[in-house]
Every structure is written in structure tokens, then in C-alpha cells.
Image (spheres, rainbow, N blue to C red):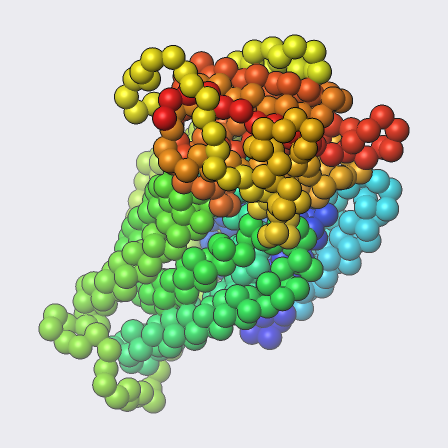
């Protein structure tokens, strides 16, 4: 248990530290791409564990050394082959994606076979009872990863491709050390034999493990599609702050299921009480960590860990805490179901929870932006947790441990002292002979092949959907006009909903107030005290952003903006913005019924390389109270200083009140 917890701390803390380092170095957009690559890695990892290492843990823990080596040779070969297939799929998807996401997927696809092989060595050592070897292997990964990340930064290659690549390639180094530690060479040719001989376990573990990973991946894609990479980065940053809790969950899982099985042998009716202890401990730990984050993040911890995006991440912490507490409640029920061997009910619970997780997150994202997505996922987790405890009660009744009408939880535990002997491990060939005698081989192979094809199709479809969306975005952006200090030119605009047809010719609309909109800054806005100058009607006075060392805000944030309050709901047909004389500004205009907070409403018009007077005529008038002018690229502040800054001298709007 000690080596298991130490190894889990080493593995999880290193991933947590890398996530924090990347978000701090690259910002929200590239961290969003990094997150997509990471959840894709999690999908492949669960597939590898279901087909390769989970059967090894169940059937070859505590066997003699020669039997273990024969099993590990085919188990690790299976993991490497799954990595090769998944890597090819990831590279194919990368060819369809936009530049930032494609770079992350390219690096992942190149290193995925070694990453899955490294994970299989960890579980192989635990099956033999040599957890220290797994700890050494993970330590090698971390020891090579740290100087590699620092080298990337020092050599000026700090982008998402190199961070994903060095993370993966150092994992491959640890995988290459595994055969020397185990004195075993992986056999790729034994993969089919391994999967076929353990077909009664592999497909079930594959579906149960990958359903959770698929739901996480679909959720990430959905948030990226609906809200953009910046919002996805904030959501993933909130999850990264909960990293220590996932270490506790995974570390407890190494002990909880074997101990639950022991309780089941000693006193079956007390299994729910043991599961309640697991639930109480994990839930209490989640609440305590959450309270610490709520207090510490705004007092310097957030800026130290996340950099400038901590402002957009902080409002997501509370729903994230509720979600992780629900995970603790669900963990107790899941422990009991696995101890009972109720595979059908456990799989049913996992699939339902995964579906609810995706639906809740997507519905919340549409309704409430990034915060809504996290709230929706938290509600889904709690529904799944309640359903899991109901499934545990039914499983105990089916097993005869809890007759109908009997209390689910005993008032006072009474532990009998006798224990039933643990059956000895069955040699590998005997297991194969028994299974071949009891069930045909053809049907499981067909189901396994169909399941694999379905999983690969789902992964490809998700990548194609993201690529298609990004392709449409690029096509729309390609219609932007370039505006200069010369006479105003029209700009194509996207459609926006209008309630009721406009009446009569468009009239001038006057905003009642203006404010700086800076969700990625310090919370005070950029020169908010000057915002009113953009709507005072005087072309000699202006609101301007802070100055930066590059047009892309020095890599510190994805953008900043100016928010106009019309005082009432109006219909807008034309937006005219008077900028500084130098071209180079990229911005978009959004109209919404409520003031944006963490996320921005969809754009109704865009302009690129703009300067001077810019007129944006909306092809479909937009209705709302608030108008947001959001800058994504800054023009030069002047001709010689080398700094970049946007200035808005005047904003006029036309439409119908």
C-alpha cells in the first residue's frame, strides 16, 4: 500500500505540476489545446488498461515469476499495439484540425505508443508485488521531464507542440527502461492471443473505463466548440486546481476495493457501512480542499499557479467543489459494486453517469457559459452518485447479503472473526481451457471488434466535428475587410436573432454608459476610468487599452474589450467605430441581452487589420441591451516605439429602439 500511494503521488503530482506549468506559460488558448490532447490521452489510456492491464491485475497478481513474465510479455505488447493504433488515429485527426490544436495532437500521436507501454509497466510491477519498481519507473519519467521542460523554455520553443512532445517523449524514456527492470520484452505478436484469452474481462473493462474517458473528451470538445478554447482553458484550469483530490481518489482506490472484498467475506451486511466510510472521508476531504481554494486563490495562490487566467477560473471553483464532493459520494458506491462483482450494474452506473455528465455540461455551457458547464457537470455527478447507492442496495439484495426489507446500514457493526480462505491464483493455461470449454470464442471476438470500431468511429467523429466547426470559423473570418483611415468600408457580419421586424428607417442609438471588459486581467479593467470617452461624441478623446510588447497582448491574454450598455433592449443594424490612425486591429462585435461575465456572446460582426473609421453593417440585425467590442489583435501604438495599443475615439450605433 505504501509503494502504491507513493507511486500514485509521483504520477499524479507530476501531471498536476505540468498542467499548472503549461497554463502559466502558454495562457488560456494554448492550454485549451493542451487539455484536448490530454483528455485524448486519457481515452487511449483507459482503452489500454481495459484490454491489457486490468485482466493482468485480476488474474496474475501474486503468481510465480515465470507465469508473471509470460503474462507480462503479452500484456505489455497489447498495450503498445493499442498505442500504435490510437497514435495513428490521433495523427489522422490532427491533419484536420486548426494550427494550435493540430500541433498538440501531432505531438501526442508521435509519443502515444510509448506512453501506454509505460503505464502497462506500472501495473505489471504491482501485479508482482514490486511497487517499488513502478515508483522507480515513474521517477525516471519525472526526473527527465523537468530538465526537458526547462530546456524548451530556455531555447525559445515554448509552445503547445513542444510541451506535449517533451512530456510524451520523456514518458517513452521511462517505457524503454521497463524491459530492463522486468527482464521481459513486450510481444506485439501476442496481443491478439492476450485479448482473446481474456475476452470475458477485457471488453467489460474496456467499456467501463473508456465510457468515462469518452465523456470527458466529448465534454471538452463541446465546451471548446460552444464557448471557445479560452473558456475551455478556464474550465480545465479549475479542474487542475483539484489535482490533489484526484491523487487522493486514485490512491484510495488502490486499497479500497481489496479491503471491501475482505469486509464482504467477513460480514456481507456491513459492506455498505464500509462504503459509507469511504464516501464520508473522500467527501470531507473534497470540501476541505475546496474551502482552502476559495480562501487562498484570490490571495495570491491563483496568480502564482495559473497566471492571469485565475480571474476567469475563480468563479468556477465553487461548482467544481460540489462536483468533486459528488465524486466522493459515488466512489463509495462504486467500491461496493466492484467488491460484489456486480459488473452489469457497475457498467450500467458508469454509462449512465457518463451520459449525464456530457448532457449536463453541454446544457450548462449553452445556458450559462463556462460557469454553467461546471454547474451542469456537478449536478450530473450528484444524480449519478444517488443512483449508484441504489444500485449497490439492489446488488446486495441479488447476492443474498441484504434480504428485502432489511436495513441497508446496520445500527451497530458486529464483525465476525472467521474469514473464508482466499482462493489461490489459477494458472494461466487452466483459465484458458476452462473459458474455451464454457463459451464460444467467435461471439466475444465479434463484439470486441464491433466495440473497437465504434470507439474509433466516435473518436474520429469528434475530431471531424471540431475540424468542421473550426473550418467554418476560418471561412467566416476570411470575409473580413481591412479598414484604414480612408473612408469607411462595409464589413460582412454573421446572423443574429431579432424579435419582431424593424419598423421604419434605422435611427441613431445612444449608449448610456461604457466600461472596460477584461475577464483575463486584474478585475479592474484596462483604463476603465476612460471608457466614457468612447461614447462622449468627441472624436478628440479616446478610451485605450494598456500597451503590450506584441500585437497578441504579449501572450498574456486572448483579448480585451469595451462594453456598452444601451439602457434598454434595442435592435442594432450598424456599428461604427473610430479607431486610431494606424491599421492592425482585429476585433469583433457581440450583442447580448445580459452583460457578459466569463464568456462572450457570439459575434455578429468582425473586422481585421482595421484602423480609422470602421463601419460594420449587420446582415441580420441583432437585438439586445449590451454591445461588446472585443479586441483580439492590437495595432501599433505609434510608428516607432515598438509597443501595441488599441484606442477607441468614438462609437456610434444605428437601429431601432
Res 640 → quadrant: top right
Q: Is residue 621 left or right of residue 491?
A: left
User: At 72% across and 61% down in the image, what residue appears?
Assistant: 139
Residue 367 percent across, percent down from the top left: 37, 41
Q: Is residue 135 above or below residue 549?
A: below
Q: Is residue 344 above or below residue 650?
A: below
Residue situated furthest left in the rendering: 405
Residue 543 shows in the view = yes
Q: Is residue 238 left or right of residue 144?
A: left
Quadrant in which the C terminus appears: top left
Residue 409 percent across, percent down from the top left: 24, 78
Residue 346 percent across, percent down from the top left: 32, 56
The one of 491 and 208 positioned closer to us in this rendering: 491
The one of 111 and 361 positioned closer to us in this rendering: 361
The one of 344 and 500 positioned closer to us in this rendering: 500
Res 457 → quadrant: top left
Res 283 → quadrant: bottom left
Q: Is residue 111 left or right of residue 128?
A: right
Residue 282 shows in the view = no
Q: Is residue 107 left or right of residue 379?
A: right
- Total numbered badges shown on the rendered structure: 0
Amino acid at each position: 500500500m505504501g509503494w502504491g500511494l507513493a507511486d500514485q503521488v509521483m504520477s499524479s503530482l507530476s501531471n498536476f505540476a505540468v498542467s499548472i506549468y503549461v497554463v502559466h506559460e502558454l495562457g488560456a488558448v494554448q492550454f485549451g489545446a493542451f487539455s484536448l490532447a490530454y483528455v485524448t490521452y486519457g481515452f487511449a489510456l483507459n482503452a489500454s488498461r481495459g484490454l491489457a492491464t486490468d485482466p493482468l491485475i485480476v488474474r496474475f497478481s501474486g503468481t510465480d515469476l515465470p507465469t508473471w513474465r509470460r503474462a507480462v510479455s503479452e500484456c505489455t505488447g497489447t498495450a503498445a499495439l493499442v498505442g500504435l493504433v490510437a497514435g495513428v488515429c490521433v495523427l489522422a485527426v490532427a491533419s484536420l484540425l486548426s494550427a494550435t490544436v493540430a500541433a498538440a495532437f501531432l505531438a501526442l500521436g508521435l509519443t502515444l505508443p510509448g506512453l501506454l507501454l509505460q503505464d502497462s509497466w506500472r501495473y505489471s510491477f504491482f501485479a508482482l508485488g514490486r511497487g517499488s519498481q513502478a515508483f522507480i519507473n515513474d521517477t525516471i519519467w519525472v526526473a527527465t521531464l523537468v530538465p526537458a521542460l526547462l530546456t524548451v523554455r530556455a531555447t525559445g520553443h515554448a509552445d503547445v507542440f513542444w510541451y506535449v512532445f517533451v512530456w510524451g517523449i520523456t514518458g517513452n524514456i521511462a517505457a524503454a527502461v521497463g524491459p530492463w527492470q522486468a527482464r521481459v520484452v513486450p510481444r506485439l505478436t501476442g496481443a491478439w492471443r492476450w485479448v482473446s484469452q481474456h475476452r470475458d474481462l477485457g471488453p467489460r473493462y474496456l467499456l467501463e473505463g473508456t465510457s468515462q474517458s469518452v465523456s470527458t473528451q466529448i465534454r471538452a470538445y463541446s465546451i471548446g466548440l460552444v464557448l471557445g478554447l479560452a473558456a475551455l482553458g478556464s474550465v480545465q484550469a479549475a479542474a487542475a486546481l483539484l489535482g490533489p483530490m484526484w491523487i487522493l481518489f486514485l490512491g484510495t482506490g488502490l486499497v479500497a476495493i481489496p479491503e471491501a472484498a475482505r469486509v464482504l467475506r467477513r460480514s456481507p451486511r456491513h459492506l455498505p457501512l464500509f462504503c459509507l466510510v469511504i464516501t464520508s472521508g473522500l467527501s470531507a476531504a473534497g470540501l476541505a480542499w475546496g474551502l482552502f481554494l476559495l480562501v487562498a486563490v484570490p490571495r495570491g495562490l491563483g496568480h502564482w499557479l495559473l497566471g492571469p487566467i485565475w480571474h476567469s477560473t475563480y468563479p468556477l471553483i465553487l461548482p467544481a467543489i460540489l462536483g468533486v464532493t459528488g465524486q466522493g459520494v459515488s466512489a463509495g458506491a462504486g467500491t461496493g459494486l466492484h467488491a460484489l462483482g456486480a459488473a452489469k450494474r457497475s457498467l450500467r452506473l458508469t454509462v449512465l453517469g457518463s451520459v449525464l455528465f456530457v448532457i449536463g455540461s453541454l446544457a450548462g455551457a449553452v445556458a450559462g457559459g463556462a460557469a454553467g458547464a461546471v454547474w451542469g457537470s456537478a449536478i450530473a455527478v450528484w444524480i449519478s452518485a444517488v443512483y449508484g447507492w441504489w444500485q449497490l442496495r439492489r446488488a446486495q439484495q441479488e447476492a443474498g447479503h441484504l434480504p428485502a426489507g432489511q436495513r441497508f446500514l446496520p445500527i451497530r457493526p458486529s464483525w465476525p472473526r472467521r474469514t473464508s480462505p482466499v482462493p489461490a491464483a489459477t494458472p494461466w493455461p487452466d483459465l484458458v481451457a476452462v473459458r474455451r470449454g464454457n463459451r464460444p470464442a467467435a461471439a466475444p471476438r465479434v463484439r470486441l471488434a464491433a466495440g473497437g470500431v465504434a470507439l474509433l468511429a466516435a473518436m474520429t467523429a469528434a475530431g471531424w466535428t471540431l475540424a468542421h466547426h473550426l473550418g467554418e470559423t476560418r471561412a467566416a473570418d476570411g470575409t473580413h475587410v481591412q479598414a484604414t483611415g480612408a473612408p469607411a468600408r462595409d464589413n460582412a457580419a454573421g446572423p443574429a436573432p431579432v424579435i419582431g421586424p424593424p419598423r421604419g428607417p434605422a435611427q441613431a442609438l445612444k449608449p448610456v454608459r461604457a466600461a472596460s471588459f477584461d475577464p483575463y486581467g486584474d478585475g479592474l479593467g484596462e483604463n476603465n476610468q476612460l471608457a466614457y470617452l468612447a461614447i462622449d461624441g468627441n472624436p478628440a478623446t479616446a478610451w485605450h487599452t494598456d500597451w503590450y510588447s506584441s500585437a497578441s497582448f504579449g501572450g498574456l491574454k486572448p483579448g480585451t474589450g469595451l462594453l456598452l450598455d444601451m439602457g434598454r433592449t434595442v435592435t442594432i443594424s450598424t456599428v461604427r467605430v473610430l479607431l486610431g490612425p494606424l491599421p492592425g486591429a482585429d476585433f469583433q462585435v457581440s450583442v447580448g441581452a445580459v452583460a457578459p461575465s466569463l464568456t462572450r456572446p457570439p459575434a455578429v460582426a468582425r473586422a481585421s487589420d482595421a484602423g480609422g473609421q470602421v463601419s460594420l453593417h449587420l446582415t441580420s440585425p441583432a437585438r439586445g441591451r449590451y454591445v461588446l467590442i472585443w479586441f483580439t489583435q492590437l495595432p501599433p501604438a505609434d510608428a516607432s516605439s515598438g509597443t501595441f495599443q488599441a484606442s477607441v475615439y468614438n462609437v456610434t450605433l444605428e437601429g431601432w429602439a
